[in-house]
DNA sequence: GCCGTTTTCGGCCCGACTGTTTTCAGTCG
């Protein structure tokens, strides 16, 4: 049982207490204790042994004994009791944006609604609008929320897709009926959301593969149509497996990877040279053409190799035919981590621990960017604490070989409603670099939001614009903003824009990132890490960067430390404008 | 439930937004 597992139970208790109409302050005490468990870095086993117990602010006598119970039994009797007394549908209803515990409780008590379906009926029968505290607008928003939930159900983000994909890959490789196996489809070329996974399997016996799949625990509803097998992953997500003989393996993998527009475009130069590229393989004069690798196919087309990430059917085929294919960014090109939270704000690890981890991953520098004071919900730093943090960073640097690794002082500075920043220029000037982000007032008009962000970019001390749309994939649309305008402003002021690696964010999205690159704006691939595990998200950011044709040269944190600091200096003074 | 006392009860993190109200409650970050 880790501190995180304990926190999960405490969060659940907070939720259920709210649904049961318990005192707000009592339920939020559980939430506070949960956060304290997550951020304190407490060693649970040691705390259980020590007579002092959980000496953490926010954890008093009652919670300490409850935490003991959780650690010993894996759950809390209070939670089990609450859960038993709560219709599970209420938890689903709670997922609707704009509905919190109080409103869900009111809907449940006054309308007897306890499922999403029941709520949808009640809305359609106009029964919600008549409840006290509700009206026509909130009813309409609830319906919107239900639609939103429906739309995102059965869909998953890139981290989940990757976990399922890699798990299934190893399971499929283990089957006696398979020779070679590869991930295909959108997971191979990178995407923001998924509703299915696609694999290509080499085997001469599709029926045997189908039989073997029954042994894979998370798969169900397996059905085969010739060489194509479909099924369900964990009862929710679609699976497609294309079984192919050895000769067609690379051609089929290629066909199952690219978008349909792309497949059409690449088929044209092949056809010009006498090759017929089909779903089931590559042919010439009706005879199969065996490929040694996917690269062979591009050679036959007279094109440079197109990396899977680019196979969307935009202009990549034309450029490959022109031989205009750059070397795209690789994970190993990344040298620095530029957007990282520590326990000083809402991160879960101390700076020293982060340094050790990041060095271990082979990076050369680290910009600590905790939240600024307006982000009090995230324990943002005020001027005094920022200074104290700077002293800690100085001390850590003293213990490091500067030629090998350096910790930089930064901040993720809130962009205030009017586009000014959360710290004065004098304070920002003391830092090595600044990430500026919007965390409030998401509902400004597009015009005002754009103006606000452009104004922040005009501040000389801003280095990088953080998560530029505020979207949370499959959860929340971003705020209304004219990204082309923002990108133009970044270009004019010599700033960088981040591509946030969090699977929920992935913004600047790859389409706009490509536009930014054309405008000469360097992209920073940023982990926005709050835990050590978050650094693993870098792979998603690199993948999305590659979709945007990002190269090492145009990646801010692929620069050496000196190169990065040089960029910061320029961004504070000189204006750089590169044409489109 | 926690905390800090003017020591046993009253306040509890802040501010914007929204939709409901007619001065505010609920939600969210």
Image: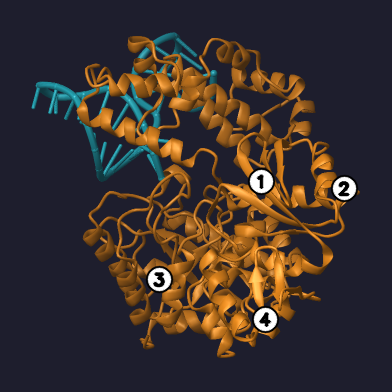
Disc 4 to disc 3, C-alpha distance:
43 Å
Q: Say which chain tag 2 marks.
A: A
The residue carrying mark 1 is: A239
Q: What residue lies at 61% left-to-right and 31% top-to-bottom?
A: A8
Disc 1 to disc 3, C-alpha distance:
45 Å
Disc 2 to disc 3, C-alpha distance:
53 Å
Q: Say which chain tag 3 marks.
A: A
Proximity of marks 2 and 1: CB atoms separated by less than 8 Å: no
Tag 3 or tag 2, which sits nearer the N-term? 2
Q: Respond whether the residues carrying marks 1 and 3 are from the same subunit.
A: yes
Residue A462 image label: 3
- Placement of A240 over or under A302, stated as above or below: above
Where residue A240 sits in the image (x, y, percent)?
67, 49
Could you tell whether A268 is left or right of A4 in the image? left
Q: Secondary structure at mark 4?
A: helix
Total number of numbered discs in the rendering: 4
Q: Secondary structure at mark 2?
A: loop
The residue carrying mark 2 is: A175
Depth check, mark 2 against mark 3: the one in front is 2
Estimate how packed mark 2 is, as few (under 14), some (14 to 19) or many (20 or more) residues with alpha carbons within 10 Å.
some
> Which chain is rendered cyan in the image?
B
């Amino acid at each position: 049982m880790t501190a995180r597992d304990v926190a999960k139970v405490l969060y659940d208790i907070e939720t259920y207490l709210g649904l049961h109409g318990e005192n707000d302050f009592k339920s939020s005490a559980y939430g506070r204790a949960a956060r304290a468990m997550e951020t304190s870095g407490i060693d649970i086993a040691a705390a259980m042994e020590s007579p002092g117990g959980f000496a953490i602010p926010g954890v008093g006598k009652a919670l300490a004994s409850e935490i003991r119970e959780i650690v010993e039994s894996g759950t809390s009797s209070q939670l089990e009791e609450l859960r038993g007394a709560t219709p599970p549908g209420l938890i689903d209803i709670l997922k609707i944006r704009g509905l919190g515990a109080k409103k869900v409780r009111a809907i449940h008590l006054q309308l007897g609604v306890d499922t999403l379906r029941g709520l949808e009926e009640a809305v359609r029968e106009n029964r919600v609008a008549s409840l006290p505290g509700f009206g026509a607008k909130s009813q309409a928003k609830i319906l919107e929320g239900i639609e939103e939930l429906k739309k995102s159900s059965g869909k998953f983000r890139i981290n989940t897709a990757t976990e399922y994909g890699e798990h299934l890959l190893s399971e499929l490789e283990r089957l006696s009926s398979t020779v070679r196996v590869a991930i295909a489809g959108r997971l191979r070329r990178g995407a923001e959301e998924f509703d299915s996974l696609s694999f290509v399997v080499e085997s001469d016996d599709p029926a045997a593969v189908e039989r073997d799949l029954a042994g894979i625990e998370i798969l169900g509803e397996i059905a085969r149509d010739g060489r194509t097998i479909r099924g369900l992953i964990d009862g929710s997500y679609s699976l497609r497996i294309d079984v192919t003989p050895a000769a067609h393996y690379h051609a089929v993998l290629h066909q199952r990877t690219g978008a349909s527009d792309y497949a059409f475009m690449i088929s044209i130069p092949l056809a010009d040279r006498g090759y017929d590229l089909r779903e089931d393989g590559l042919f010439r004069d009706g005879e199969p053409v065996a490929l040694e690798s996917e690269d062979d196919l591009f050679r036959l087309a007279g094109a440079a190799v197109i990396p899977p990430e680019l196979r969307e059917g935009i202009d990549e085929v034309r450029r490959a035919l022109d031989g205009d294919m750059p070397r795209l960014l690789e994970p190993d090109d990344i040298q620095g981590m530029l957007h990282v939270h520590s326990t000083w704000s809402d991160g879960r690890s101390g700076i020293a621990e982060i340094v050790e981890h990041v060095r271990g991953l082979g990076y050369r520098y680290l910009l600590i960017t905790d939240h600024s004071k307006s982000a009090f919900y995230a324990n943002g730093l005020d001027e005094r604490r920022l200074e104290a943090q700077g002293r800690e960073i100085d001390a850590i640097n003293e213990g490091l070989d500067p030629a090998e690794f350096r910790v930089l002082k930064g901040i993720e500075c809130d962009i205030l409603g009017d586009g000014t920043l959360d710290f004065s220029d004098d304070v920002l000037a003391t830092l090595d670099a600044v990430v500026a982000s919007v965390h409030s007032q998401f509902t400004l008009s597009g015009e005002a939001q754009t103006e606000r962000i452009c104004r922040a970019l005009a501040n000389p001390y801003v280095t990088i614009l953080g998560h530029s749309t505020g979207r949370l994939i499959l959860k929340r649309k971003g705020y209304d903003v004219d990204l082309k305008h923002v990108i133009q402003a970044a270009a004019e002021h010599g700033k960088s824009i981040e591509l946030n690696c969090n699977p929920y964010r992935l913004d600047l999205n790859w389409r706009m990132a490509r536009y930014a690159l054309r405008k000469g704006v360097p992209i920073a691939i940023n982990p926005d890490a709050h835990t050590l595990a978050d650094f693993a998200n870098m792979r998603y950011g690199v993948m999305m960067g590659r979709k945007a044709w990002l190269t090492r040269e145009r990646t801010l944190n692929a620069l050496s430390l000196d190169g990065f600091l040089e960029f910061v200096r320029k961004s504070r003074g000189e204006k750089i404008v590169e044409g489109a």
